[in-house]
Image (spheres, helix red, strand yellow):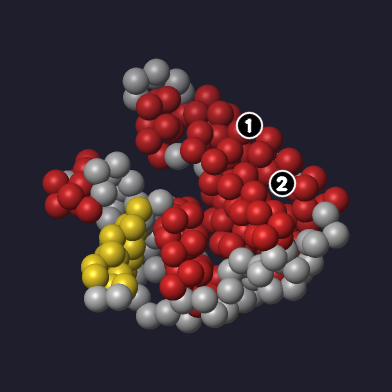
Amino acid sequence: MTLYGYFRSSASYRVRIALNLKGLDYEQVAVHLVKNGGEQFAPAYRALNPDALVPVLQDEYEGHAVTLTQSMAMIEYLDEVYPQPALLPPAAVARAHVRALALAIACEIHPVNNLRILRYLTGTLEVSDDQKNAWYRHWCEEGLKVLEQKLAMDTRTGRFCFGDEPGMADCFLVPQIANAQRFNCDLSGMPVLMRIHQTCLEHPAFIKAAPANQPDAE
């Protein structure tokens, strides 16, 4: 199994966590998003992913080569093909709840703060770095505040986003908090998120997946 990614990419980070939680062996291929004009734009990489985004996951399933894009699809695939330990709960309603938590990050917070969006702001629209960072903090803080409310009011929240074992939602939460901290977001009013985040950071799968522990870390 091969994961093409970038140490600081939150989407790559999510998949690394999931792979580690599953105890799967995988090779990493670094795709630097900044050097050489962005290695994700190289023709060889675009042949893997025309979107020029990371990560890409390659595997072999039932004798066939599999190439996957989009971190949510990868994590769903891993949970179906390598079912233990499960990243989603067994009941349909609970699974939908966990997916909704993950998608709140993947669809509502992360897209407007992605690297290519930030580059468009400073490049094409010529906003200042201060304005770009204010944009980032606004949307990240707004999204995380909502997630805090959802977790705080739900009795299914435990040591982790759902219950007392790490799962899909935690794979998405930890990278987003890491990005929020990089951009100096105000996380002071989010005690549930930060408690779960700290619990995750003490888990071996999350430690191994941390950006600083990747072979391409700068």
Secondary-structure class at tag 1: helix
Q: Quadrant of the C terminus?
A: bottom left
Q: Is residue 9 left or right of residue 199?
A: left
Nearest to N terminus: mark 2 or mark 1: 1
Q: Where residue 151 appears, x then y in whole percent?
A: 77, 53
Q: Amino acid at mark 2?
A: Leu
> Which numbered disc covers residue 147?
2
Q: How many marks?
A: 2
| Pick the front one: 126 or 68 | 68
Report which quarter residue 93 is drawn in.
bottom right
Q: Residue at x 85, y 59 (%)?
A: 155
Q: Residue at x 58, y 29 (%)?
A: 134
Q: Residue at x 64, y 49 (%)?
A: 100
Q: Residue furthest top?
A: 125
Q: Amino acid at mark 1?
A: His
29 in relation to 34, above or below: below
Q: Is residue 22 left or right of residue 12?
A: right
Whole-angstrom CA distance, mark 2 to mark 1, is 14 Å
Secondary-structure class at tag 2: helix
Q: Is residue 63 left or right of residue 69?
A: left
109 in relation to 131, above or below: below
Q: Residue at x 70, y 70 (%)?
A: 199
Report which quarter residue 78 is drawn in.
bottom left
> Which numbered disc covers residue 62?
none
| Pick the front one: 88 or 51 | 88
62 in relation to 218, above or below: below
Residue bearing the label numbered 1: 138
